[in-house]
Image: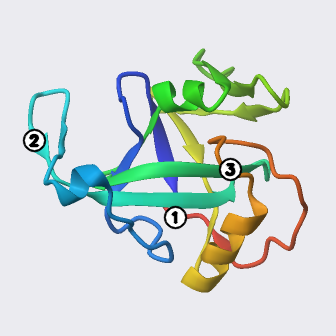
Amino acid sequence: IRAQVDSGAIDTVTPKDTAAGVRVQDTKASKAGIGNVAANGTKISNYGENKICGYTDDWTGVTMTMQCTDVKKTLGSVHRMNQGGNAVMLDGADSYMYNKITGKVTPIEYEDGQYIFYIWVRRDSAAAEADKDDILKGNKFAALAVEEDRSGFVRRG
């Protein structure tokens, strides 16, 4: 999953077909028909959320909740990263996310004026569901406590 870092986003949002192996879960907001609003004021439908479990490019384990909406690309909310115990430094090619609990530094790429990070997720839903047990819950972007085989992961744009 290619995620663009967004300092103005309250929630991390993604197209509803992102990570096809992960089931979209209903939320109170999606059940009530409450959506999101884009920066330009456009209303955006909310279909629920995905709880993504995967790895960054440097194989740091991450778990992240993404609101499934009618956006064109995944936007990673700096606000939610901060709530997960991370400081985010955006400084061109020297950008990174720093986990204040573990001390882990995760690079953020600078591509054509955009700050990007990638999350590798499993191709199939059974393996994706199994990852939820191995990746720490409750702390978005938390470091993995275990090592495991990383076969079956693909980069999707």
Instruction: Label 1: state its secondary structure.
Output: loop
In space, the residues marked 1 and 2 are separated at their CA atoms by 27 Å
Q: Determine whether label 1 and label 2 are within 8 Å by CB.
A: no
Going 47% across and 25% down the picture, which residue do you hit? 79
Image location (x, y in percent) of residue 1: 52, 57
Task: Name the residue type under label 3.
Answer: Val
Q: Which residue is mark 3?
A: 62
Instruction: Label 3: state its secondary structure.
Output: strand
Which one is nearer the viewer's eye here, 109 or 133? 133
Image location (x, y in percent) of residue 91: 60, 15
Tag 2: Cα neighbours inside 10 Å, few (<14), some, or many (≥20)? few
Furthest residue in direction left, as rendered? 42
Q: Is residue 124 visible?
A: no
Task: Name the residue type under label 1.
Answer: Arg
Asked if 17 appears above or below 96 in the picture, the reply is: below
Going 43% across and 22% down the picture, which residue do you hit? 7
Q: Is residue 149 visible?
A: yes
In space, the residues marked 2 and 3 are separated at their CA atoms by 29 Å
Q: Which residue is mark 1?
A: 156
Going 79% across and 53% down the picture, which residue do you hit? 59
Instruction: Label 2: state its secondary structure.
Output: strand
First reached walking from the N terminus: tag 3 or tag 1: 3
Q: Determine whether label 2 and label 3 are within 8 Å by CB.
A: no
First reached walking from the N terminus: tag 1 or tag 2: 2
Which one is nearer the viewer's eye here, 87 or 32? 32
Q: Which residue is mark 2?
A: 43
Colour mapping used in the image: rainbow
Asked if 121 appears above or below 40 in the picture, the reply is: below
Tell whether 125 sits left or right of 15: right
First reached walking from the N terminus: tag 2 or tag 3: 2
